Image (cartoon, rainbow, N blue to C red):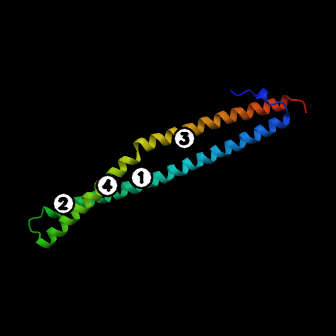
Amino acid sequence: MSDVNLLKTRSQCVAAKSALLAEVDGYQNRDQNLDYQDRVADRSETSVAARLATATSQLAYATQELARPDLSDADRKRYKAQEMTTRHLKERLENRAEEEGGTNAFLADVDADQVDAQVAVLTTAIAAVQAHHDGLPA
């Protein structure tokens, strides 16, 4: 813990408290930005999941159609192309879904913990400065 006795006057206490409050505002803004990023990530994950479900369904349909023995050559060609395209899209979406978690999620948690810890330190320092200020002669 920082030594508030380094602050010799009430005006130094006021200046220190003002600087600490500004720093807390910065961390609170950062915290709000992290919350916003979480909301964006949640929407992205939902979008990826929905697109993956659609691609999976389309791939199953194309595969099912290709299994039909009475399929014309033109239809077979069309469903084969659809199957290849949809399989590629599905694999890309699966990779993207895997990438959204893991390292990025861990680092986001660390960042949020860091912000919380810094705000706690600053809040304690602000309380100590205010108490010191109140104990100094006017």
Q: Which amino acid does label 1 sit on?
A: Glu
Going from N to C along the chain, the mark reached first, 3 or 2, is: 2
Label 2: state its secondary structure.
helix
Label 4: state its secondary structure.
helix
The residue labelled by disc 2 is: 63
How much space separates mark 1 and mark 2, taking CA atoms? 26 Å
Q: Tell me, yes or no, if residue 72 can be seen here.
A: no
Q: What residue type is labelled 4?
A: Arg
**Label 1–label 3 contact, CB within 8 A:** no
The crowd level at tag 1 (other Cα within 10 Å; few <14, some 14-19, many 20+) is some
How much space separates mark 3 and mark 4, taking CA atoms? 29 Å
Q: Is residue 105 left or right of residue 118?
A: left
Q: What residue type is labelled 3?
A: Ala
Q: What residue type is labelled 2?
A: Thr
**Label 4–label 2 contact, CB within 8 A:** no
Going from N to C along the chain, the mark reached first, 1 or 2, is: 1
In this view, the residue in front, 114 or 82, is 114
How much space separates mark 1 and mark 3, taking CA atoms? 20 Å
The residue labelled by disc 1 is: 45
Q: Position of residue 50 (x, y in %)?
A: 37, 57
Q: Tell me, yes or no, if residue 55 can be seen here.
A: yes
The residue labelled by disc 3 is: 112
Q: Which residue is drawn at 15% across and 63% down?
A: 66
**Label 1–label 4 contact, CB within 8 A:** no
Quarter of the view holding residue 93: bottom left
Going from N to C along the chain, the mark reached first, 1 or 4, is: 1
The crowd level at tag 2 (other Cα within 10 Å; few <14, some 14-19, many 20+) is some
Q: Is residue 77 left or right of residue 136?
A: left
Going from N to C along the chain, the mark reached first, 1 or 3, is: 1
The crowd level at tag 3 (other Cα within 10 Å; few <14, some 14-19, many 20+) is some
